[in-house]
Amino acid sequence: MSRKPHVNFQFFMAATVNTSFVGILRVILLTALCLFSFAPGSIVWSQEPVPTPTPFVDPISPADVIPAPLPNDPPPVAPNFASPLRPMPSSERIGVSADQPLTLTLDGAIQLALDNNNDIDTVRREKQISEFRLMSARGVYDPFIAAESYYERASTPTASAIGGAVNGAVTQTRFFGSGGISGLSPRFGGSYSARLDASRTTTSNTNAFLNPQFPSILALGYTQPLWRGLRIDNQRRVIEISKRNIAITDSQLRQQAIDVVAGVERAYWDLVFAMRNLQVQIDAVRQARDQFESNRRQVERGVLAPIELVAAGAQITTLEQAVYSAQESVTRAENTLKTLMLPDRNAPEWQRAITPVSVVEIDTPTLGLEASLAEALRNRPELDQLAETAAINEIDKRFFRDQTKPEINLVGTYTSQGLAGTETPAAINPTTGLSRVPPNLVGGFGQSFTNLLQQDYPTFRVGITIGIPWGNRVAKANLGIAEVEGARIRDLRDRAEQLIEAEVRNALQALRSAEARLASARATRVAAEQLAESEERQFRAGTTTFYLVQQRQLELVTARSRELQARTDLNKAISDLHRVLGRTLVENNIELR
């Protein structure tokens, strides 16, 4: 069998595009191979017939690959909108003039707050109200003076000759005057009264021996409780409670002063941090601008790519945002401090920028837990207020327990009378022709008062009154309420002591943590400064990138801010410890009067 020539056209398509030299060479070789295969005489004798390849059938029909229709485009909304470029915010702060700065120390801020703070003024007013209430309670013992005078004319019908009637009636006229004093005794719960009456009386009675006549009466009385009301009564109860309320308002004033001073200290240190942080951010922007100028000169010389200039500009704008945020923080901190210091919204200091000048470095106190707890339990105003409240409760219990007793009072009265007048014809005895009126009763007001003072006609009365309210459930219920209130006050004191325990522990821990954070933040800032300087030297030498320089600069800014924050936190922790221990006023040499 003769062999027939078989042409085998086998070639390969390369779909990979490679711009390297090896890739180009490979493409050239494949192209030459393909041309040689199609050239005449390119015959390959095959030993076996080559099988016909089976055509590939795609299981997915062409209809399946038709893409789904997309929705129509929406109508244009505000097609001409463009975000305008806004100018950078002004460096001036709202409502504050930098031309008239207010230089302020911490002591000066505290003094202004104590003089002008509205909360302290409110507590002062409460103390004045309590003092007036005590005056009102003591006023119950002020003597009550009463006087009375009048003219009276009375006609009484009389049908008897013995009654001395004229035309069947007796007419009497009287000029009456009376004066007296009464009141309560501040000791032992007694009450007293004294009264003097005098009058000039004329009558048409034909049997009267004296006409006109001048009667006078002096009456004295005293009532002394023997059981209920002897040791305590409602008047003495109110006075004792008013005294305790004054002590409570004193403690409240002290507590309010402590809170205000502590608030001023926190606000002052927040303002110090905000202003120093603002300066740090401004310095960072200045440093970034210097770096921008350095990059611009290197770009002009061809040392740096122009994109590095864009990166430097982006860093400047980023840092500028931090500047304006810090500026806002300054305004907020300043307004908080002014709110505590100034009396009202019309104070001229609202228009002035505050410049704090106190020393930031404060000595850190070293105290143990047990000593701190003992000092806090001894000095905290809240415990003083609860002690006064417990004393008021004891007063209530004494009073309501006394009200459950029977009422037994000793009552005594003494009356002295005087009389004088002008003799009438009826006073003459028709048999003897002598006056039937004693000589000491003849005269006017003077003789009547003489007879009164000589006590020729006294009247005495001494007795006991007893009153027993049946059941007396009101007093018993009030006593039960007072006893339950006493238990509630004890619970409140236990709760307050627990809170003080927790506050002291937290304050000591916060002080220690703040001190440790300050040391770490200071070390971090020193390291960040060294790293930033090293990165800048490497950048000038061309061994690093501007991106790393940016990172080091941002880390330095962050480290400086954290150090300032740590210093501020430590100062605030010291202030809070003084508040928790109740020594804020002592530490600031403040004496409340």
Image (tube, helix red, strand yellow):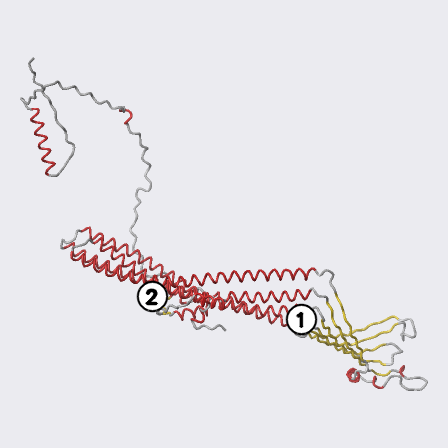
Work out which quarter of the rendered image holds the N terminus and state it: top left
Residue under numbered circle 1: 231
- Name above or below for residue 43 compared with residue 358: above
Q: Position of residue 356 (x, y in %)?
A: 36, 68
Which percent across, then down, holds residue 20?
A: 12, 39
Q: For this rendering, which residue is in front, 260 or 425?
A: 260
Q: Please tell me how crowded label 1 is: few (under 14), some (14-19), or many (20+) other residues with Cα within 10 Å.
A: some
Q: Which residue is mark 2?
A: 98
In the rendered image, residue 190, in percent from the top left (x then y), is placed at 70, 73
Kind of residue indicated by mark 1? Arg
What residue appears at the point 6 percent right and 26 percent down from the top-left corner? 36
Closer mark to the observer between disc 1 and disc 2: 1
Apparent side of residue 7 relative to residue 520 in the rendered image (left or right) = left
Instruction: Determine the secondary structure under disc 2.
Output: strand
Quadrant assignment, res 474: bottom right
Specify whether 120 is left or right of 99.
right
Viewer-closest of 334 and 435: 334
Looking at the picture, which amino acid does disc 2 mark?
Ala
Q: Using the image, determine if residue 59 lies above or below residue 265.
A: above
Residue drawn at point x = 8 percent, y = 28 percent: 33
Residue 341 seen anywhere in this rendered image of the structure: no
Farthest residue toward the top?
A: 1
